[in-house]
Amino acid sequence: MKNYLFGLLGLVLFISCNREPKAKDYKREAIKVNPLVYPDNMIKIFAAHGGIDTWNTYEGLYFEIDKPTINEVHTIALKSRKSLIKHEYHELGFDGDNVWLKHLDTLSYPKNPKFYYNLMFYFYAMPFVLGDDGIHYENSDPIQFEGKEYPGIKISYDAGVGTSSDDEYIIYYDKTTHQMEWLAYTVTFFSKEKSKDYHFIKYGDWKTIEGLTLPNTLSWYNYENGQPTTKRSDLHFVNAKLSREQPSDDLFKVVDSTTLIK
């Protein structure tokens, strides 16, 4: 009887210890969707674009950015966020721990590699990337554009999430269809300080790919007093594909003649 009681006590202690929450390591942990309920307006936005559950069934994303000579090709492992960007003169990758750059020519890389390696993916994969863990939602004041009002949801992050956890986003949507129409965002990567200077992107030319509605065109706008004004430039996405198979890790590995970005 005594041995039974000691055994039972040990089992209870084992279960209790294993139920203690562990601290998250957002840098190394694969991105997972927060199982908590999203705000109702965010759920409707996800649904208008095919649903967050559908998004979570995919493992890989491929798209190209239309360029004058050779398109810029992006491949992303959606759960780990490993990535590879191939262009005419360079390859830029993220292997889960390191950002790396490989020169295919003598030309210098025109952008900041650590800033750029996941930037276009993040913009393109809206609104679904706003379902990541470590995100907080709150209602934001609407914007007005060409006589139409767009309600907003402000997104902020837990400390340590991503490379710029002080970044903030506001997603603006059609109040009838709940389709995403605008994104406002701040950039804190360079200053390392919170900013109130929101840049504006208009989303358009939507295309349904494997059940998900993703944009063909992003348009950057000038802005004044927290409102978009006139169009500045367009970026066009082509040949997008989603896969339920995870891209090979070999795509993202650091190889010879590669520079690690510190």
Image: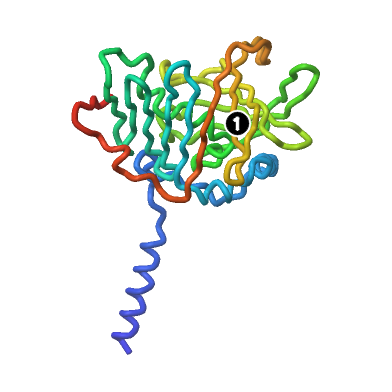
From the viewer's side, name the closer residue of 9 and 27: 27
Q: Is residue 194 left or right of residue 86?
A: right
Give the quarter of the image for residue 221.
Answer: top right
Looking at the rendering, in which quadrant would you find the C terminus?
Answer: top left
Residue at point 53%, 37% (across, down)? 129
Give the quarter of the image for residue 77.
Answer: top left
Q: Amino acid at mark 1?
A: Pro
* Residue at the spot of label 1: 215
Q: Confirm whether residue 262 shows in the render.
A: no
* SS label for mark 1: strand
In the rendered view, would you say 185 is above or below 98?
above
Q: Confirm whether residue 13 shows in the render.
A: yes
Looking at the rendering, in which quadrant would you find the N terminus?
Answer: bottom left
Residue, far left? 256
In the rendered view, would you say 85 is above or below 51?
above
Q: Is residue 222 left or right of residue 63?
A: right
Residue, far right? 147
Residue at point 38%, 45% (across, down)? 247
Residue at point 27%, 17% (across, down)? 105
Place of residue 18 in the rendered image (x, y in percent of width and height, measured from the top left): 37, 62
Marks counted in the figure total: 1
From the viewer's side, name the closer residue of 2 and 97: 97
Place of residue 81 in the rendered image (x, y in percent of width and height, measured from the top left): 41, 39
Place of residue 212 in the rendered image (x, y in percent of width and height, measured from the top left): 60, 42
* Mark 1 residue crowding within 10 angstroms, few (<14) / some (14–19) / many (20+): many
Residue, far bottom? 1
Residue, far front? 69
What colour scheme does the image use?
rainbow
From the viewer's side, name the closer residue of 32 and 112: 112
Residue at point 52%, 18% (across, down)? 195
Place of residue 197 in the rendered image (x, y in percent of width and height, measured from the top left): 56, 15
